[in-house]
Image (cartoon, rainbow, N blue to C red):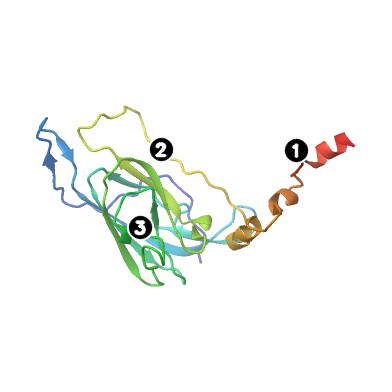
Amino acid sequence: MDLVENEDHKELQPEPRNNILKKNSANGKVSFGGKTVRYDLYVKDTIVNFTGKDRKAIAVNGKLQAPTLYFTEGDTAEIYLHNMLKENTGFHWHGVILPNEFDGVPYLTTKPVKPGETHLYRFKVSQNGTYWYHSHESLQEQIGMNGILVFRKREGNPQIKYTREIPVLLGEWTNDNPKQIARRLHMANTDWYAIKKMRYRVMGKLLSPEISEQSC
């Protein structure tokens, strides 16, 4: 596994396809893009070092986090997921209205993408706004499999004027195994991480070593 590349924040360019445009009968403007926009996403194991220790992560097209994908309302999205992992994977398109079979939740709406397989997610973009996409398989989204979706308004709709758009997806990193984190968070009658940080609540009051010493 190779070290992940540095993020450069450049927009991933989709494969160009022929446009199929329709005109709005009311104003004669092109208002429904109708073009097909294709992206290819290659998912692969990688190594990162954010804390002085090498840890396993998952890179999409050589990056953490996954590339930002751009579409215009009315486009047809064709997103090819190439699974180069040694385990099942898949992408869920969070908050997106689409056919159930392309929703991307393995064993529920979509079959998991097995190692070596390529899976096509194809759906019509019927909304605008900023969303995100992520894996729903084995907590893979915790180690890199998540990215931004940008659905721009169709031409002819009111547009907000701005100099530059920079989508931001906030995240954090821990060297702990995601499955171990989930197990600790679901432990009954305890807050493992609060105890680890020595910050916990007693009778509804937040206690810490500093507060405890002052109250003695």
Q: Is residue 116 toward the left or the right of residue 72 in the image?
A: right
Between the C-alphas of marks 1 and 3, the distance is 42 Å
Say which label, 1 or 3, has the lower sequence index: 3
**Residue at x 16%, y 48% (from the top left corner):** 19
**Label 3 sits on what residue type?**
Asp
Location of residue 142 in the rendering, given as x and y in whole percent from the top left corner = 53, 56
- The residue carrying pointer 1 sits among few (fewer than 14), some (14 to 19) or many (20 or more) residues within 10 Å by Cα, namely few
Kindly report which numbered mark, 1 or 2, lies closer to the viewer in this rendering. Answer: 1
Q: Where residue 194 sits in the image (x, y, percent)?
A: 71, 48
How far separated are the C-alphas under marks 3 and 2? 26 Å
Q: Nearest to the eye among marks 3 and 2: give it.
A: 3
Number of the label disc, if any, that sits on residue 136: none
Quarter of the image containing the C terminus?
top right
Secondary structure beneath dot 2 equals loop
Q: Which residue is mark 1?
A: 205
Mark closest to the chain's N terminus, 3 or 2: 3
Which residue is identified by label 3? 103
- Contact between labelled residues 2 and 3, with CB atoms less than 8 Å apart: no
- In the structure shown, which secondary structural element does the residue marked by tag 1 occupy? strand
